[in-house]
Image (cartoon, rainbow, N blue to C red):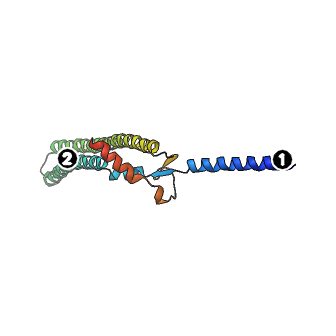
Amino acid sequence: MKRAVVVFSVMLFVLSSIAVSQAQTASKVGVVDLLKALNDSEHGKKAIAEIEAMKKSKQATIDEKGKKIEQMKAELDKQASVLSADAKKSKEEEIERLIRDFQRLVSDATAELQKKQREVEVDLIKDLRAIITKIGEEEKYFYIIEASEGGLLYYDKAVDITDKVIKKFNETKKK
């Protein structure tokens, strides 16, 4: 009976030692805010600036076309009383055609900007994930969780490695 108690105690001690050892090994956790990394990295800031410049360019073209349509409408309103029915109908049809072209231009510009933004985000996230994997392997993290998309509601800021990821990402992009 004493022997069984001693064996049981030794087994309990060994198992608890193994569990503590595994818990200590598995305790290194990291958290990364990918959205912050995207927006705060140098490459991310450049990409955002390029998209904004593209957006402003497209908006300028859209505004110009919109003003032209408004001018044509104003001219038609001024001349409506002196124009023949055929001439008035012709101008109205031209304005309607320009409006359809304008709507297509707005739609195409929006789609192009969204496509460009998605492409840039996918490329940046792919690069960031590679950096995160490298940091995880080099620094022996058990796992790294994504903060903004992962549904993580709370974490101690001490495990946040976002700034480390941004720094490493900026370094690799400079090379």
Q: Residue under circle 2?
A: 61
Which numbered disc covers residue 154?
none
Which numbered disc covers residue 3?
1
Q: Looking at this view, is 5 or 136 the one in front? A: 5
- 11 left or right, relative to 87: right
User: Looking at the figure, which quarter contains the C terminus?
Assistant: top left
Closer to the observer: label 2 or label 1? Answer: 1
- 158 left or right, relative to 128: right
SS at circle 2: helix
Q: How many marks?
A: 2
- The correct choice, above or below, for 13 with respect to 116 in the image is below
- 45 left or right, relative to 33: left
Q: Looking at this view, is 108 or 23 the one in front? A: 23
Residue 113 picture quarter: top left
- The residue that appears at 47% across and 55% down in the rendered structure is 159
Residue 56 horizontal/vertical position (percent):
22, 50
